[in-house]
Amino acid sequence: MPAPGHILVVCTANICRSPMAAGLLQHALAAQPEPLRSLPVVSAGIVAHTGDRVSENSVIALKKAGIDISGHRSRPVTQAMLDEALVVLCMTESHRASIQLQAEEVPGHLYLFREFLPPPAAREIADPYGGSLKAYEQCRDEMVEAIPSLVARLKTLVPAK
């Protein structure tokens, strides 16, 4: 179980998008001042099994960015994860709707990963599962594009020490 105050990134099976997004966001936060630098970023899936390996193309796409997620193992979203998350970031509106429908208590800060990009940027990140490495790299690049706006938003939610 992650520590209270973590950032939770959610996708479907927790083997492609959310592990990539969590790795990228954790990497970006490491360059920020405290307390952002110390915020743990974890991922989970709406319909994830426990212990599945991250997809090989996700590992390769992030390795090209200097980030190793090869040790990631999937896990399902739990109410405790939602309750203790500072922010929950979803890949699609269907993930957000699933949390809103199924959670005993809906998190107050429930967003899309790309929600803070200026229009006309697409808000959802499509699932690359089963696609080519190029599809995974495009998914990664869509996440990278969102990181500055996401970090700016996190700065408004996490008071500086």
Image (cartoon, helix red, strand yellow):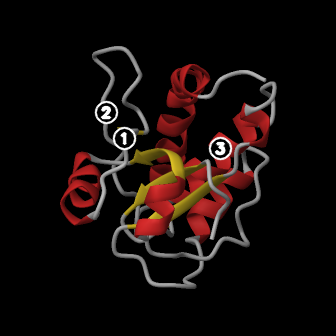
Which disc, if any, is residue 24? 3
Which of the 4 image quadrants contains residue 159? Answer: top right
Residue 17 visible in the shown view: no
Labels 3 and 1: the sequence-earlier one: 3
Secondary-structure class at tag 2: loop
Report the quarter where the N terminus lies.
bottom right
Which disc, if any, is residue 123? 2
Q: Sort mark 1 into few (<14), some (14-19) or many (20+) by Cα contacts within 10 Å.
A: few
Give the image location of residue 53, x and y in percent.
59, 79
Q: Sort mark 2 into few (<14), some (14-19) or many (20+) by Cα contacts within 10 Å.
A: some
The residue under the point 44% across, 84% down is 49
Q: Is residue 43 left or right of residue 78?
A: right
Q: Is residue 71 above or below residue 61?
A: below
Give the image location of residue 79, x and y in percent.
40, 67
Q: Is residue 9 left or right of residue 126?
A: right
According to the image, label 1 marks what residue?
108
Q: Could you say which is closer to the camera, residue 161 or residue 98?
A: 161
Q: Sort mark 3 into few (<14), some (14-19) or many (20+) by Cα contacts within 10 Å.
A: many
Label 3 near label 2: C-beta < 8 Å?
A: no
The residue under the point 55% across, 19% down is 156
Q: Is residue 34 above or below residue 62?
A: above
Q: Is residue 73 left or right of residue 121?
A: right
Secondary-structure class at tag 1: loop
Give the image location of residue 47, x and y in percent.
34, 75
Label 1 near label 2: C-beta < 8 Å?
A: no
Q: Is residue 56 above or below residue 106?
A: below
Residue 56 visible in the shown view: yes
Q: Is residue 79 above or below residue 34?
A: below
